[in-house]
Amino acid sequence: MTPQVDSISSDSELPATTDVVVIGGGIIGVATALTLAERGIAVVLCEKGIIAGEQSCRNWGWVRQQGRDHRELPLMVESTRLWEAMDARVGCATGFVQCGVVYLEETEQDVSARETWLEHARPYGVDSRIISAAEANELLPGSTKHWAGALYTRSDGRAEPSIAAPAMARAAQAKGAIILENTAVRGIETTTGAVSTVVTEKGSVKCSSVVLAGGMWSGLFCKSIDLTLPQLGVISSVLRTRPIPDGPELSASAPGVSFRKRLDGGYSIAETRGPTIVEIVPNSFRFGKIFLPLAWLARAHLRPRLSRRFLDEWQQSRRWSLDGISPFETTRILDPEPLSGALDRARKNLAETFPFFNQLEVAESWAGLIDATPDAIPVISAVDALPGLFLATGFSGHGFGIGPAAGQLAADLVTGNTPLVDPTPFRFSRFSDGTPIRPVVAP
Ligand SMILES: Cc1cc2nc3c(=O)[nH]c(=O)nc-3n(C[C@H](O)[C@H](O)[C@H](O)COP(=O)(O)OP(=O)(O)OC[C@H]3O[C@@H](n4cnc5c(N)ncnc54)[C@H](O)[C@@H]3O)c2cc1C
């Protein structure tokens, strides 16, 4: 089921020409379109379903620098600054609050792993620190567990996935962007080897640049134009509670469970540090080798599962005629079944760790399919083989918080502005130029 998400008023006319077409109306596509429109660039965003209908309304809503790989930290530090100014920028609420984020640990060994991360993070000026059990209990009283310590970042926070990307999309429209829902992009046409036209189910639009921000669909789109983007999906399930008066403001992750307060006073809750369900699909074999280091790192938690998706993806066309129906039109919104086992464990772990939540009432539950790359770092990059094409995808389960800065970086690459941060770690070519794959497992 698709969780609550704000609607926007979709534009209806595809123009004949524009400067840039953005494919995908998740937070990354929307942040890219917003930045481009603010710079006076003509931009059309095409979304096959609804704005934020896939991962961008299904995530936990954490906006965190804490625990990020050093390759992402400079971009995430910038993103935190952009979130701080976001409500003023878009003229309405996105739910962003710097409520703090804490990772509670039960063993000295786990605290020491957090200390190691902290050493890596220090050069980036993040205000993360290790806190004692006493301080952790002060921040989050009433736990039944004896903490060995915790990692805490006061400047981290949360935003509301159900409203954030739609608010940014409306602001982009106000700045002149054309945003079309129910408009699948079928493919790209080229002239003298460079992007010249985008073909959608509603007709064609001439343009000089395209930003592919298609989330879990980016790999299939790339394959249709002879590019290899290694990408696999991970299912993640979430439940939302009804409002709980006087609950904690802080977002917390403890062994077995994470929670984050919602704007309506309820909580988004999920299992953490538990089994990671990876569905076996044809791409698992195609990309098996390049994903091996990540699989090895995550082996304690990995639970490969054969499901219907194997057959669906096996039968899915990899090529289609641009005047026929594409796979992007046959699935408007990717809506996997939530895993009831994961949600049951999350509830049980929460009630055992924080009895305060004993009486919670579940309002709804859902799942999302996370688009993972082999190193769990996104691709924000020009594509050398196809001038005019840019990728902004593969956010590997942590793209919501970094979304505003990732969109700005993608826009910088398109317009040739000085990039917000050094884009080298995000280059597409790292998967094919012999660069060793150095994966990060998101905590
Ligand atoms: C359960 C869960 C919890 C998460 N928690 C967090 C968190 O707390 N913090 C955090 O930072 N991140 C989190 N994430 C990750 C975060 O949600 C994603 O990284 C982020 O939303 C990715 O945004 P996106 O725009 O790249 O992709 P998406 O939001 O998936 O958007 C891609 C869009 O592209 C559209 N599209 C694809 N192909 C086409 C086409 N050919 N034509 C037109 N449209 C197309 C799709 O319909 C889709 O709407 C979580 C993810 C999940 C699933």
Image (cartoon, grey):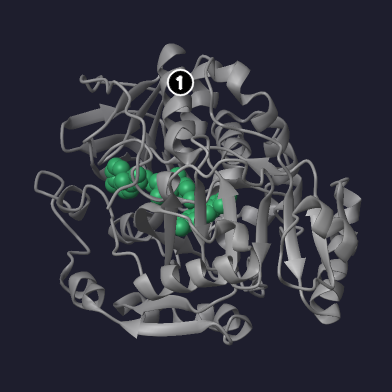
Q: Which residue is at 56% across, 57% downward?
A: 357
Q: Does 250 appear above or below 130? A: above
Give the crowd class for mark 1: few <14, some 14-19, many >=20 residues within 10 Å.
many
The residue shown at (31%, 60%) is 220
**Please, what is the three-letter code of the amino acid marked with disc 1?**
Ala
In the rendered image, residue 67, in percent from the top left (x then y), is placed at: 73, 60
At 59% from the left edge and 41% from the top edge, which residue is drawn?
406
Furthest residue in direction left, as rendered: 324
Closer to the camera, 254 or 172?
254
| Residue 48 appearing in the image | yes
Q: Can residue 376 be spotted in the picture?
A: no
Q: Give the quarter of the image for residue 157.
A: top right
Tally the numbered discs: 1
Q: Nearer the viewer, residue 215 or 147?
A: 147
Q: Quadrant of residue 277?
A: bottom left
**Is residue 357 rendered to the left or right of residue 194?**
right
Left or right for 300, reference 138: left
Q: Nearer the viewer, residue 182 or 387?
A: 182
Q: Position of residue 74 (x, y in %)?
A: 76, 46
Instruction: Give the secondary structure at mark 1.
Output: helix
Residue 319 sits in quarter = bottom left
Q: Write down the residue under mark 1.
A: 172
For the C terminus, give its image quadrant: bottom right
Q: Is residue 60 above or below residue 262?
A: below
Q: Is mark 1 within 8 Å of ligand 1?
A: no
Residue 400 position, x and y percent, is 54, 45
